[in-house]
Structure formats: C-alpha cells, structure tokens
Amino acid sequence: MSAEQPVEQVEQVEETQSAHFAPRATFVGHNAAIESIEVDGEHNVLVSASRDKTALVWKLNRTQEQWATPFTRLVGHNHFVSDVSLSRDASHLLTSSWDNTLRLWDLATRTTKKLFLGHKKDVLGVTFSPCNRRIISVGRDNQVKIWNILGENKAELQCSSWVTSVACAPMADENSPLVIAVGCWDGKVYIWSIEKEAKLIKEFKAHDGRCTSVDFTPDGKWVITGGSDRKVVMWLTENGAKTISFTTPSPVHAVAACPTQAWICAATYEGIAVWDIGAKQQIDLVQPNFKREGKRNAGRTPDCTCLAWAADGSVLYSGYNDGSIRAWEVKSA
C-alpha cells in the first residue's frame, strides 16, 4: 500500500532579516502547495503534507550546514494530503486526505499500517491525542470522528458546516479528559471534553467568515483561532470567553503558539505575523526574500500556509504554497 519516489535536496537560502528570527534553510521536496507540517525535535524528524498527494519525512540535523535531509516520500493517497500527525515516539505517522481517508503509516517499513474509512467527503485534519490512544479527524462531511488506533470509529460529533481544523489540549496525565477544539467553515468553534463520552464545553461564533485554524496555548488554558476575516483570537478553554483579538492585513491560513514564550504566530499572505501576548502587540513580520529568489509572479508571492514550532521553541518552521518549507531560528536576546 505504499511506494517511494526520489526527493530533492535541501537548499540553503539567505532570507530577509527579521527582528526576532534568523533564516536558516529552505527545504525543497514537494512540487505543490504544503498543507501541513509537524516536527519532532527529540527524534530529529519533520513531516510535511502536500497537494502533490504525498507526505514527506525529513531527517533534521541542525548542527550541520545541511539542515534537513529528505528521508522518504509516502505515496498512497489519490488526492491532496491535507494534514499530518506524528506519534510520540515518531515511529508512526497519520495522514488525512481529500480522498476521504486517513492512513496510519509505519515509518520503519514505510508502509500503510491501517487505512481508516468512514468520512463521506474530504478529510481536512487529523491528530493523535496527546496520549496516542485516540485519533481525531475532521472533514467536509461536517463531522468530527474519534477513532482508536485499530481504526475503529468510536464516536462521531456533528458540526454545522465543514470542519477545517482540529487541535488537542495538553493532558496532565493519561487519565485526564481529552479536550479538543475544532474550527469550521461557517466561523464556529466547538470545544469538547471527551472521556467515555463527549461533553460539549462550548459552541460559539469565532469569526465572520471561515475559521481556518485552531491551536491551544502550551498550558491548555486558551484556544487560539485564525480566520478568513483577518483575525487571530484567544478564547478561554473552560468557557469559550473571548480574551484577546489581533488583526492581520490578510486572511489567516494557520496559527501556532510558541511552546516557550508568550508568542502567537499566524501564517498569512504577507508573511508570518508574530504577537507578544503579554504586551498585546505585534512584534514581528517574518518574510522570505521572494523577490531575490525570483519567485514573484505578476506581483504575487507565495503564501505561508502552515506553521510548526520545535518543542524547545528555538526554531519555527513554515510551509508555503510554492512547495517549499523554511526554518527560522529564534535569535538570542
């Protein structure tokens, strides 16, 4: 159920200077837009999902000039790969696709271990629960599905429109309730607590337009959402109360909370907007030098589509709709 294709090497590219981030590398391996990236620094692995219908596994080595080495390409989906999620030990990878399926890959054998069937339309997001005992997927059938690792669909949660994104709150221990947030095409956000059954904590209208991305702060106390209305908003997890709202010049494709500093990042057309939560102000706009790279097309540059932080907060990775991935190292104070 798997096949491999050759992958391209990593390019070292000098980028535009930023106040808080130093450019380190550009990874070139996909030939279509990057939909999702995830990084596991402990195991030195980065994974990417693309509209070229594949997922790519990269080996990271930040001590060498070549920051990342393409390891293998996972082929099996017959439509866009929309999302990726690594297991805690980085031995397995979940992928979701517009072909209505999920796949659980064994990275040692590079084969599909389990094919998940049940969504009736495109699957737009997938994630392991923090304890890796559950799998949560969302899609254009307006459903949130809860699976076990055997591929058995244990629960279905209904939403009012397409479900575009999903995130899990950190868990204190493996016996704690699983708390998830999902964002929807109609701008709504749902927060559930899941034990033996799912309990809806809050359903609310978060954006005037699509909710494109959700994330949790590292302590799990806030849900962060981004939308096509050019807003990034923080909500209390326990009751959905709105606390802070930021405005961007263009629609938000993705949001990501820094694991070590009180920063929120948003992927937009203009670049990566960075806010300091404590100061409640934007502190940076990270933009590659696309003009120098020769990638201007009728005045338009590639959009930043997705983000992922290294667990130690030292590097921010960004994916673009030209198929590239970039690494930005946080500058020392």
Image (cartoon, rainbow, N blue to C red):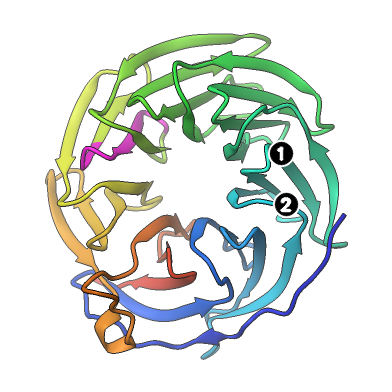
Q: Look at the numbered disc 2 and give the secondary structure of its residue.
A: loop
Local packing at callout 2 (Cα closer than 10 Å; few below 14, some 14-19, many 20+) is many
Q: Is residue 287 left or right of residue 150?
A: left
Give, as a single range, the part of the protein colored magenta: 220-232
Type of the residue with mark 2? His
Where does residue 164 sit, x and y in percent of width and height?
A: 47, 35
Which part of the image, by quadrant, shows the N terminus?
Answer: bottom right
Where does residue 63 sit, x and y in percent of width and height?
A: 54, 84
Question: What residue is at 45 percent from the left and 79 percent from the top?
Answer: 26
Mark 2 or mark 1, which is nearer the start of the sequence? 2
Is 229 in the magenta? Answer: yes
Question: What residue is at 57 percent from the left and 59 percent from the top?
Answer: 50
* Residue 289 visible at all: no
Q: Quadrant of residue 124?
A: top right
Callouts 1 and 2 close, C-beta under 8 Å? yes
In the picture shown, does residue 82 fall above or below 301?
above
- Tell me the tag on residue 77: 2
Q: Look at the numbered disc 1 and give the secondary structure of its residue.
A: loop
Which part of the image, by quadrant, shows the C terminus?
Answer: bottom left
Q: Is residue 317 left or right of residue 41?
A: left
Q: Decide whether the magenta segment is chiefly helix, strand or loop.
A: strand
Q: Which residue has dot 1 on it?
A: 101
Q: Quadrant of residue 7?
A: bottom right
Local packing at callout 1 (Cα closer than 10 Å; few below 14, some 14-19, many 20+) is many
In the picture shown, does residue 294 fall above or below 77?
below
Where does residue 300 sit, x and y in percent of width and height?
A: 25, 69
Type of the residue with mark 1? Thr
